Image: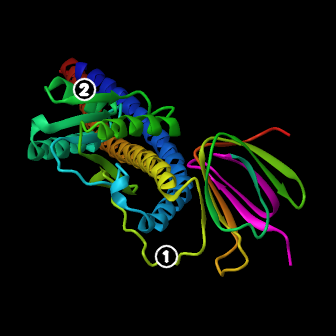
Amino acid sequence: MSKLFKLDIVTPIKTFSFDNVSYVKCPGVDGYFGIMKNHTNSIINLTDGTISVKTDKNEVKFSCSYGIADINSDSSDDIEDKVLLLVENAEELEK
Amino acid sequence: MANLKNLSERIKSVTSIQQVTKAMKMVAAAKVKKAQEKMEISRPYSKSTQDLICRILPQISVSDISLVEKRKVKNTGVIVITSDRGFAGSFNSSVIRLAEKEIEKLGKDSVQLFCLGKKASEYFSKRDFNVKETYFDFWKDMNYDTASNISASFINSFENNEIDEVHVIYNRFKTLASQDLIMEKVLPVDFTADYNATNYNYDYEPGQKEIVSTLIPKHINVQMWQQLLESYSSEEAARMIAMDNATENAKEIIKELKLEFNKARQAAITTEMLEIVGGAEALVD
């Protein structure tokens, strides 16, 4: 089974979509946390910080302001696997 | 001869007005397109936010969240969205007219106004209305923070019990040729909770209530942002149509003036020839 999942970073002025993501690190209210395939379904508040997205090819980093993460990637149910990060502001960082 | 000179000057001035209106029309057309794109881009965010709130809301008690709770209405906040500049047909006057009518209905003393755009700010400040806050000169470099600032201010008033309901009056973009004049309630927020949403096992961090309480202000921000964009697109569309009409009218006037000019020129030539012929005949006699 593939270990990749879909990720959308949605802001009011831009949307970043990734198809083949292996790992995302997000700034949660209680500290940074990582999301991989089959993460339990969760909704988590995010705070200011850096989001790092690891795809099968490269790694991209974003700075973000506070937002929310909606994680649907539990294999035990039939919702489509998808991670949605709703943030007010996201800016891609220079590599 | 004075008539001829007069006419040619008028033709010249109408032609230059036509050039200006034509240019303004094209500028407005470009701006509408940009604003529409922005509107499209903000939709996924707004939709996802709303979906999330509707999903979580059935699981908690609504009375805990101040922005959803319905209170007895004593004072109302009204947000009036207009533009900074004119030349847009009846765009501003129709918003102001509706606002005045609604304020009359709610009672002038119990309404606090939030005026967006120079036109509303000037109109209501001069006329002894309860103007709480005015915002203008932001349209040109409007960004998401503008919307957040505005909504933060009325959310604050709402939470301090200064106002018990907030309405917004603005032009919603329909097509390039038409706008809908709309009055919407922003606070307290109405959600049709989605009780049918299957509740899979979700982990909430920190808790459902906290998540919803942070989501709702965001939802209001993005709504404000969209309303600003709708109004901005409508403004530019209205301006485009107004300028198009002006250009057409100028064309009409130029046509009429040219006809008159040619007639006058012809008349002048005829008189001149008659004079020559008359003079020659007098010599012969």
Mark 2 belongs to chain: B
**Residue A67 location in percent, x, y?**
59, 48
Amino acid of disc 2: Glu
Scheme by which the image is coloured:
rainbow
Q: Residue at x 54, y 49 (%)?
A: B38
**Residue B53 location in percent, x, y?**
47, 61
Per the image, label 2 sits on a secondary structure element best described as helix
User: Residue B281's image quarter?
Assistant: top left
Residues rendered magenta in the picture: A1-30
B46 versus B107 height, above or below: below
**Residue B133 location in percent, x, y?**
30, 29
User: Which residue is more in the foreground, B277 or B188?
Assistant: B188
What label sits on residue B272 in the rendered view?
A: none
User: Which residue is more in the foreground, B10 or B179?
Assistant: B179
Q: Is residue B182 visible?
A: no
Main SS of residues in magenta: strand
Q: Tell me which numbered mark, 1 or 2, is placed earlier along the sequence.
A: 2
Q: Residue at x 55, y 52 (%)?
A: B37
User: Residue B109's image quarter?
Assistant: top left
Residue on which the image places disc 2: B122
Residue on which the image places disc 1: B197
| Residue farthest right in this picture | A57
User: Are there few (<14), some (14-19), or many (20+) residues within 10 Å of tag 2?
Assistant: few
Task: Kindly indicate whether the residue at mark 2 contacts the one at mark 1 (C-beta within 8 angstroms).
Answer: no
Q: CA distance from mark 1 to mark 2?
A: 48 Å
Q: Residue at x 53, y 75 (%)?
A: B199
Per the image, label 1 sits on a secondary structure element best described as loop
